[in-house]
Image: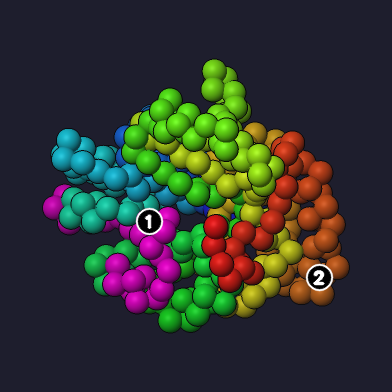
Amino acid sequence: MKKPELLVTPSSVSDVLPLIEAGADAFLIGEQTYGIRLAGEFSREDVKQTALLAHAHHKKVYVAMNAIFHNDRVQLLGDYLTFLDSLSVDGVVFGDPAVIMAAKETGVNLNLHWSTETTGTNYYTCNYWGRKGASRAVLAKELNMDSVIDIKENAEVEIEIQVHGMTCMFQSKRTLIGNYFEYQGKQMDVVGRNMEEGLFLHDQERQNKYPIFEDANGTHIMSPNDVCMIDELEEFVDAGIDSFKIDGILKSLSYMTEVTSLYRKAIDLLTTDKDAYEDQKEDWVKRIEEIQPVNRSIDTGFFFKETVY
């Protein structure tokens, strides 16, 4: 049985080796100039060191170039792609067609992974970008399991899904914390605005706290819970999904190594002994519940839902 790739997002170069030891197959990294919602900032030297370390252990490195590019940044794309090509990184994650155009103009030999967060919802679109040059499509987080499997059955490209971690509910290129959310008044209060970390949008009606962070690409509001599919991987593996992503945004290294290790065990057992996987999966869920950050429960995202927020 085909084993899906286990893809994780480290926050620094120093995270890479512990995550390799925990069982990661691939890493998604980048810098804010080119990528959005990164677990950490990786300079060019950091990208180089990560690529050298990962490749020495026969692991893959993908670099995020999935930001929304305006004219002032378009001229930077060719040089950055040439730099990544010189390191033989294993893929570039993009959403803007400008990246494909720049890749063609510079003649780089890089795998391109299409990812727009929201519009990867059908196999026609995945295949469209495949025929434009993409080798992989990253599916939208709002799809249910049946839709994911249907896309995989009809896709001409590799398919990646997120199986663990927080997801983005809202993004704006503007820095909204200081103005828009304050306008909401009593219904929505920004909690901890002066704190460097731990900034939340508090929905009193639902008793949810939505993590917020701002970076060079604007404001991002994240889900109140973490997706956790460690006990529901069988249908995805049977369908041949190519990559399972664990997103490490706002997570500690100790959390990421533990979760990566558990998913490594789950994937390995599921592809060799399904009965053993069934026997152990509830214990893995309990362990993840034990290490979850305070006020962040786990759920199955939209995989079993018919509606969205």
The residue wearing badge 1 is 116
Locate residue 132: give its quadrant: bottom left
**Image quadrant where one finds the C terminus:** bottom right
Category of crowding for the residue at label 1, using alpha-carbon neighbours closer than 10 angstroms: few (below 14), some (14–19), many (at least 20): some
- Residue 144 drawn above or below residue 55: below
Q: Position of residue 298 (x, y in %)?
A: 71, 51
Q: Which mark is residue 105?
A: none
Q: Residue at x 42, y 49 (%)?
A: 62
Query: Which mark sits nearer the N-terminus, 1 or 2?
Result: 1
Look at the image and give the residue range highlighted in magenta: 104-129
Q: Position of residue 55 (x, y in %)?
A: 47, 47
- Foreground tag (1 vs 2): 1
Q: As drawn, is 146 to the left or to the right of 262?
A: left
Q: Quadrant of the N terminus?
A: bottom right
Residue 142, percent from left and from top: 52, 62
Look at label 1 and name its amino acid.
Thr
The residue type indicated by label 2 comes to Glu
Q: Which type of secondary structure does the marked residue at label 2 adopt? A: helix
Q: Is residue 138 above or below residue 26?
A: below
Is residue 50 visible from the viewing direction of this image? Answer: no
Above or below, 274 against 287 in this view is below
